Image: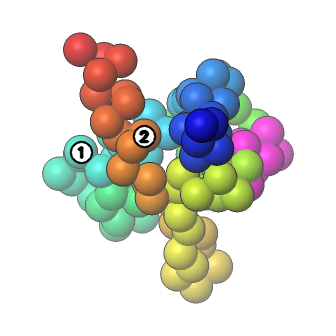
Amino acid sequence: MINEENIQLFKALSEDTRYRIIKALIESENNPEENQYGYRGELCACEIPEIIDRTQSNTSMHLAKLLDWGIIKVRRNGKMRLYSIQNEKIRKILEVLEE
């Protein structure tokens, strides 16, 4: 039986920009210090492009896809959109890959 969730996880990791976004979000979670906006474990949509070295429009497109797939989540705080990891499997997959 094919598990669509697993297929989406591997699609997310197979594309360079999406991989970089996921990696940056996980690193943000593991960083005990607050980011430049005063948040821990979350990244603002405005800082992700700089972290992953991509344009804002390219990053936004990939963030939307990751949201659609349920891999990341977003919350609003005023005008800021703060992203974090939602799917636990993605963390486990990256742990194995980086051993």
Determine the main secondary structure of the stretch shown in magenta: helix
Relative to 11, say whether 67 is above or below: below
Number of numbered discs: 2
Q: Is residue 31 left or right of residue 10?
A: left
* Label 1 crowd (10 A; few <14 / some 14-19 / many >=20): few
Residue sticking out furthest to the left: 32
Task: Specify whether 54 is left or right of 97.
Answer: right
Amino acid bearing label 1: Asn
Q: Residues within 10 Å of mark 2 (few under 14, many from 20)?
A: many
Would you name the residue on which mark 1 appears? 30
Q: Quadrant of residue 1?
A: top right
Residue 62 appears left or right of 36: right
Q: Does residue 37 sit above or below 9 in this rendering?
A: below
Residue 17 x/y as whole percent: 65, 30
Amino acid type, mark 2: Ile
The reply to whether the C-beta atoms of the residues labelled 1 and 2 are less than 8 Å apart is no
Residue 34 place in picture, x, y as percent: 27, 58
The tag on residue 89 is none
Q: Residue at x 31, y 36 (%)?
A: 92
Distance of label 1 from label 2 (alpha carbons): 14 Å
Image location of residue 80, percent across then percent down: 59, 72
Q: Residue at x 17, y 51 (%)?
A: 32
Which residue is at a point 73% across and 49% down the rendered structure image? 65
Nearer-N-terminus badge (1/2): 1
Which tag is nearer the camera, tag 1 or tag 2?
2
Q: Which mark is residue 90?
A: 2
Quadrant in the picture for residue 27: top left
Q: Under tag 1, what secondary structure?
A: helix
Indicate whether residue 57 is drawn in magenta. yes
Tell me where the magenta segment starts and ends, as one range.
56-64
